[in-house]
Image (cartoon, helix red, strand yellow):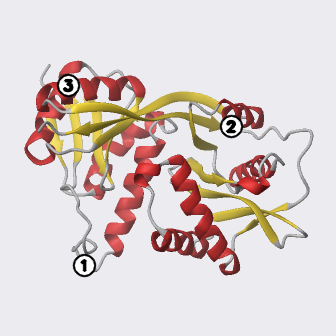
Amino acid sequence: MGLTVTRYGGAAEFLAAAEPYLLEREALNSLMLGVVRAQRRQATRMRSGHPAAGLRRLPAAYLLVADERGPLLAGITSGPRKFMLGWDGAAADEAIAALVQQLLPTHRGLPSVFGPAELTRRFAEQWRAATNCTVATGMRQRLFKLEEVTFPTWLPDGQLRAATDDDSELLAEWVLSFQLEAVPDDAGDRDSARIIVEQLVRNRDLFVWAVDYGARPAAMAARARPTVQGVAVNLVYTPPEARRHGYATACVAYLSQLLLQSGWSFCTLFTDRGNATANHIYERLGYAPIADFDEYRFTPAR
């Protein structure tokens, strides 16, 4: 098969090699594209190469498996807990095996992997065989894509507006609550939530559905991970006391419409596959499911 595995020194080098191929299925690969583009931007801003004090990090990995026809499989590290796989899920077992062998010397303690469901399942099987680790199922997500918003016949009173500094303290509490509900194993703390909100507000990437003549946020959603033609919607959250009033539905509908009107060709959005109610709501707005994504968590053998 003539497989080669190339390890790149940074996000910019990886994108130079992989981005043209990832863009062939831009929506499917939007998570990897968005994450690596953000890492490239961060690298250009960093004045120091030292990680934050006390934060344990695996060595960075930007890996591309190819044969004579071109790239077959891509993998990147994404934060301290995840290794992310990308492509269309049809990579041969030999390509996965080559990636596993390339990772073993530096990433034997890999905590988890996330990516297209079938591809990630096969990687997890080979990683378990190579390391004798224990494998557990983590998040089970569904990726949706929207090109045109279908507005419901009824939406609650209120309006979409960009979040402001005055909202920051409240929205930091919401971000932390969202993390504790959606990704409890990866949730941060109040200080990290404040930092997230401050950056989102500064970049005008965080939006709220506001009631009481625009004064009081009732739900939030964020713009995230822009690629060439698409952009993601994430951090969709309504506090428990304001749920079942349609505020998040309105927030996502109007934010998606705003993004499309701003020039994006499509929006993407991840959901919990087990949340049938949320999945149905997004489909009613025009979001169509395009792929399932799974996480597998690894516990090293003792």
Q: Is residue 8 left or right of residue 277?
A: left
Q: Nearer the viewer, mark 1 or mark 2?
A: 2
User: Alpha carbon of mark 3 to alpha carbon of mark 1: how far?
Assistant: 37 Å
Return the x and y of residue 161 as percentages of the image width and height: 77, 66
Q: Nearer the viewer, mark 3 or mark 1?
A: 3
Camera-side residue of 266 and 278? 278
x 46%, y 50%: residue: 184
Which residue is rendered at x = 60% and y = 67% of the image? 173
Q: Earlier in the sequence, mark 1 or mark 2?
A: 1
CA gap, disc 1 and disc 2: 42 Å
Q: Any mark on residue 182, and which? A: none
Q: CA distance from mark 3 to mark 2?
A: 33 Å
Residue at the image point whose x is 31% and y is 43% from the top = 18
Q: State the SS at label 1.
A: loop
The quadrant where residue 2 appears: top left
| Quadrant in the picture for the C terminus | top left
| Left or right of 190 on screen, residue 71 | left
Q: Residue 67 versus residue 131: which sits nearer the camera?
A: 131
Return the residue nearer the eye: 172 or 214.
172
- The residue that mark 2 highlights is 278
Q: Residues within 10 Å of mark 1 (few under 14, many from 20)?
A: few
Amino acid type of the residue that numbered disc 3 sits on in the rendered structure: Gln
Q: Position of residue 194 (x, y in %)?
A: 53, 73
Q: Give the numbered dot on residue 126.
A: 3
The location of residue 209, given as percent across then percent down, is 78, 60
Q: Indicate which disc, 3 or 2, sits on the residue closer to the N terminus.
A: 3
What residue would you read off at disc 1? Answer: 48
For the question of whether residue 268 can be seen, the reply is yes
Crowd class of label 3 (few under 14; some 14 to 19; many from 20; radius 10 Å): some
Three-letter code, disc 1? Ser
